[in-house]
Amino acid sequence: MAEDINMIKGLWVTRRSPSISHLFFADDAMVFFHANTDSCTNVVNILERFGDISGQQLNLNKSFVKFSKLEKVEEVEDLKAILSVGQVQVLDRHLGAPIDFTARKMNAFKYFVDKVAAQILSWAALNLSQSVKLILINTVLISIPSHVMKCFKLPASITNRTDSLIARFWWGSRGDKGMQWVKRDIIQRPKGMGGLGIRSMVYLNDTLLFKQVTRMHCNPQLLVAHCIDPIHECPLCMGEPSTCFRGNTSWGRRGLFNVANKVVKGYHWKIGRVKDLISPDTRTWNTTIIRERFEWSIAQEILEMELPSNEEKDDAIADNVFCRIIWKLNIPPKWSLFLWKLVMNGMAVKSNLVKRGIEIEDYCDSCGTTEEDLQHLFRMCSFARYAWKNCSLNILSENDESTPFGQWIQNYIMLYHSEDGKKSERIGMFIGVLWSLWLTRNGRVFSNQGGYLADLFRNYNTAMHNFSVWKTKEEGEDVRKKDNNNNGAPPGFQRINIGSEKEEITYPQMLDWK
């Protein structure tokens, strides 16, 4: 109202945008007006009247003012005396988002990296499993800069540094850096595409910004839409990227339009039912139909597209299906991650360590004749072949040696899943053998254990016992059997009969001795 009666004059973001005199959010307020004596006096009077009417007094010690760099020093001192507040040169942050930018944008967003690093450091003393770390990353670490990413495009140095910290946290242990066995761009893929679902800061930033662009596009009456669109036409409205930024474009506006340009450039023309344009016999484009239905230039572009072979398409579909199945199996989360690492060749076997430049002898500690890689350790080693042949699954792991190890695992998991469903007992036994082979190998390498068959049997039986207990808890049953005839026990207590017969928990056995 003060602006309507010419008591103050607000701020114009552009010549065509509406005037902005104030921004209110909860108990925070920002007032914009021309720096002159009349405006300052009127603002002080308005605030005093507000205090008299509402009974709330403004705390001048927590208030401050910033003047334009074009203001003279003498005028600034006089206006400060009227407002009775302190002066700052940089506004720093408002509601957690930086609003004053310098030439180096990285300095304005560096505090996000510090926040993520401090949060990771607070967890360093905890013995967190990688399954728990995955939850903490997607719920805590990713959400720290999400508020600001809805408003600004973060510099590449900030997003890369944050992604590096998150990757080091997931692969490391107790604050150590650890060794990253799988590329970062792979673990940032969705789980259905072979990744871990850890969101990339760059793509998350673009996604959140595009939501704002879409919101302004669908609601042109918003204040932010009026401030941005008058000088720059919306790329979504034009249907083509905006290549011209007139004037001194702000960092926020530039980020919004760059994201909109990415979306417009990524538009693809959808043909429709593509199979009608392909000859079923030769698996090539049907030139006659394409020439009849499309213009010459469009038809030429279609004919230049290369059609994938059936084998490539089937392999891609099978891989995506298998990646989705891994995370839906009725197995403990650590087994799902273990299975994912095996498929992605992300285990610290000797062959992988040698490739990383670590000087060690790469032969297998069990047989001592062949290089230790995943294929040999879990399939071709005599120790592994004996385990697979004598377990209840009765698998001949040495058959078809040309099959890659990841594909070999995928074949058996898909077979058991198709026949038994996601709660297949055979899948649990199959992964249990893999798990016990890995534990036995680690005990032999790091703990100076013998690594004999007895160790393998013990590790497998322990793994299957823990798996049975985990399934019981997941199904909502209490592992501890309650005595229904336990009369006389007070509420909240259980009665234990010392020396009574113990009820054994059964689980699948490892070997059938022959």
Image: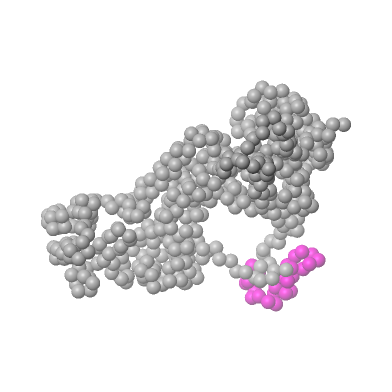
- Toward the viewer: 142 or 212? 142
Q: Does residue 313 belong to the magenta stretch?
A: no
Q: Is residue 398 left or right of residue 42?
A: right
Q: Outermost residue toward the right?
A: 514
Q: Answer above or below: position of 23 versus 181.
A: below
Q: Is residue 288 left or right of residue 264?
A: right
Q: Quadrant of residue 28?
A: bottom left
Q: Is residue 270 left or right of residue 127?
A: right
Residue 105 coordinates in the image, percent (x, y): 37, 50
Whether residue 404 is visible here, answered yes or no, is: no
Q: Quadrant of residue 18?
A: bottom left
Q: Answer above or below: position of 82 versus 501.
A: below
Residue 369 coordinates in the image, percent (x, y): 76, 26
Residue 33 coordinates in the image, percent (x, y): 22, 64
Whether residue 308 is visible here, answered yes or no, is: yes
Q: Outermost residue toward the bottom?
A: 292
What is the magenta range?
Answer: 276-301
Residue at left 61%, top 49%?
Answer: 195
Residue 245 coordinates in the image, percent (x, y): 39, 64
Q: Does residue 297 belong to the magenta stretch?
A: yes
- Toward the viewer: 278 or 176? 176
- Toward the viewer: 106 or 278? 106
Residue at left 52%, top 49%?
Answer: 138
Q: Quadrant of residue 447?
A: top right
Residue at left 26%, top 66%?
Answer: 21
